[in-house]
Amino acid sequence: MFKPTHHRFSQLALLGALAVPAFACDGPGEDGLEADLPPAELAADVGALAKGEVALADYFIVTHPDYRRCVAPICGGHFVARVNTSVARCADGTWQEECHMFELDLSGLGLDPSTEAKAKEAFGAGTALVRGELKQVELGGGGSSPADVLVASEIWVGATGNTPKGHFSRVDDSGIDCVTYPCPVFSERSLNTNLSGPLDTVDLSASGATPAQVTSGMSELYETGLLVAGQHGVVTGPAGSMNRLDAAEFYLRVK
């Protein structure tokens, strides 16, 4: 099960970890790399979120089931959190550390019933990420309270089922080829923030994934991009120093 402390990172910690110039000869900042290791317990600035200084990409992960004893849909379902940040906009419009979700709505993704059921199961178990928006939705039933529903535009399922550690990023092929190293082969964007940076290496095997899972993940990365939870290391060579990303878990998009 996902541990809530893994999703809380100060924006400054992520900035130090990600904002490394692509062709810099100086190494990545030591402070940023150190800050990338332990989770920061600093609360995000809700005012900055409201002003758009932090991108609201809204990638969520389940933190724990809702075992409260009250009438559904007020209770039941799960609690979710926005990865990489310490607050989320809940279905009722308030900003909280985690939000109630009675139901996950995947109807807009056009999945077949079997795939949809497996994706919902994975999300409920904390082994998937959903991009979407929390809304209050009338489910019917004669005057019952509106339900807190996470309406998904994307769902990504973990390859290994590992508990994610570190920060969450989207990684894509940069299209850049070099004659030396380190080289910005990949581009990294931190989920739910406006931070980005280059990567020389993405090590999916660090997650303990099988060779077949690594091959599948790298194929997906080069074709359409991959979501990765992990931590940074440093690659040093003739062209200077650059970050690498060591995966604790990686996620493939369900289509």
Image (tube, grey):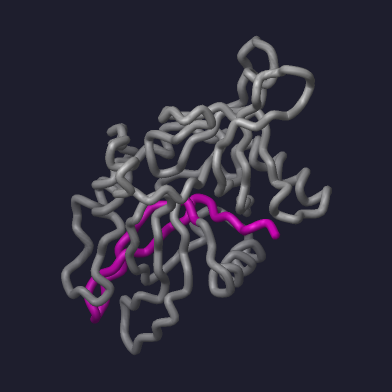
Q: Quadrant of residue 78?
A: top right
* Residue at the (64%, 67%) spot, across then down: 216
Q: Nearer the viewer, residue 68 or 143?
A: 143
* Residue at the (47%, 74%) spot, across then down: 173
Residue, far top: 69
Residue, far bottom: 179
Percent of width and height locating residue 175 = 44, 81
Percent of width and height locating residue 16 = 24, 54
- Residue 202 higher or lower than 80, as above or below: below
Residue, far front: 143
- Residue 201 higher or lower than 87, as above or below: below
- Residue 234 higher or lower than 168, as above or below: below
Please, what is the dominant secondary structure of the magenta stretch? Answer: strand
Q: Nearer the viewer, residue 213 or 173?
A: 173
Residue, far left: 26
Q: Quadrant of residue 17?
A: bottom left
* Residues in magenta, as a range: 228-255
Residue 167 is left or right of residue 151, and the answer is left
Percent of width and height locating residue 174 = 42, 76
Residue 203 is left or right of residue 132, and the answer is left
Q: Is residue 59 magenta?
A: no
* Residue at the (37%, 71%) spot, across then down: 200
> In the rendered image, which quarter contains the N terminus?
top right
Q: Nearer the viewer, residue 171 or 244?
A: 171
